[in-house]
Image (cartoon, rainbow, N blue to C red):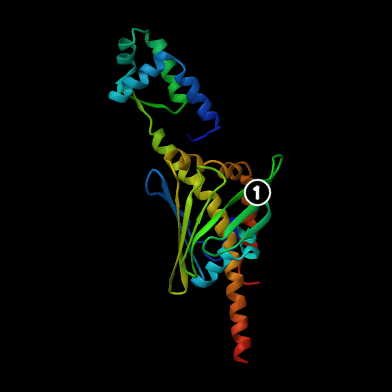
Amino acid sequence: MVQYTSPRLDASFAAISDATRRGVLEQLGRADASITDLAETFHMTLTGMRKHVLVLEQADLVTTEKVGRVRTCRLSRRRLDEETEWIERYRRPWDARFEELDDVVEELKRKEQVDERNTRK
Amino acid sequence: MNAIRESEPTPVTNRTTVERKSEREVVVTRTFNGPARIVFEAWTKPELIKRWWVPKSMGMTLLSCDMDVRVGGTYRFVFDQDASEPMAFFGKYIEVTPYSRLVWTNEESDDGAVTTVTFEEQGGKTLLAMRELYPSKEALDAAGTGAAEATVETFAQLDELLVTLSAGAGPS
């Protein structure tokens, strides 16, 4: 399992520690929904559901968009972001190594050129 | 800093790309501005590998580096990381084809990868591809953290290195 130690991950765990919020994620996995729809499905007040959605939003698990009077909730693209983040984590140390390797290659090339000139003399 | 970079004749840095080919395999590619024989040399001589394998940005130092680069030969790198026990990275070479291909195993745990590095020369430049095949998806997932984590923590050092490189780059 990938080990993340980011504050964002802590926020994710906190967000999914609640049964209602896990239910909301499941529901949104099936289809986008408005806060009103979610409140009805989970037999909650609008204010109560807004709070849950806010927690999910802060953990980057859900995004919301307000069009007119309706706020629509959907699952965030976070999973994709994690993949990108993994690639970047893998890439960065290699990129740092290769920048150093560039210097070694440059030096060996110069040395070879000098040797060649000396041989020709 | 931008102004300095623009006025200095900084050589163009080639891009390192990473692609997950499958659940267990990742491929890192990069072009180097030199012939394959030189790039291969830099991967197979301990005194040269020492100079680039552990950049300062990794927050580690290379204590020792033993390499017996031939089929069946072993390698062992020992690193020192602040506030922790020295860490060894070891395995053996299973294929050594001068200037074109190197394959080695990594044996410090059951999650070690088999690494294949190919060097392909084109017009005086070398396209390097490094494939790492892990025993499981979980092993590859975990490999994305580890050493890379140290890099994130010491990102400031990387910035410093980049400044040094861009200021001191070019023929000396």
* Farthest-out residue, left: A31
Residue B116 x, y percent position in the rendering? 46, 57
Tell me if mark 1 has few (under 14), some (14-19) or many (20+) residues whose alpha carbon lies within 10 angstroms of its own: some
In this picture, residue A51 sits left or right of residue A110: left
Q: Nearer the viewer, residue B66 or B165?
A: B66
Q: Which residue is mark 1?
A: B157
Location of residue A49 (image quadrant): top left
Residue B105 x, y percent position in the rendering? 51, 53
Q: Compared to A79, does A35 lie above or below? A: above
* Residue at 65% from the left image edge and 57% from the top image edge: B65
Q: Quadrant of the C terminus of chain A?
A: bottom right
Q: Look at the numbered disc 1 and give the secondary structure of its residue.
A: helix
Q: Compared to A53, does B64 lie above or below? A: below
Residue A90 x, y percent position in the rendering? 50, 47
Q: Is residue A31 visible?
A: no
Question: What chain letter is assigned to the residue under label 1?
Answer: B
Q: Nearer the viewer, residue A95 or B116?
A: B116
* Residue at 28% from the left image edge and 24% from the top image edge: A30
* Farthest-out residue, right: B83
Q: Nearer the viewer, residue B49 or A58?
A: B49
* Farthest-out residue, bottom: A121
Residue B77 x, y percent position in the rendering? 63, 53
* Residue at 43% from the left image edge and 16% from the top image edge: A52
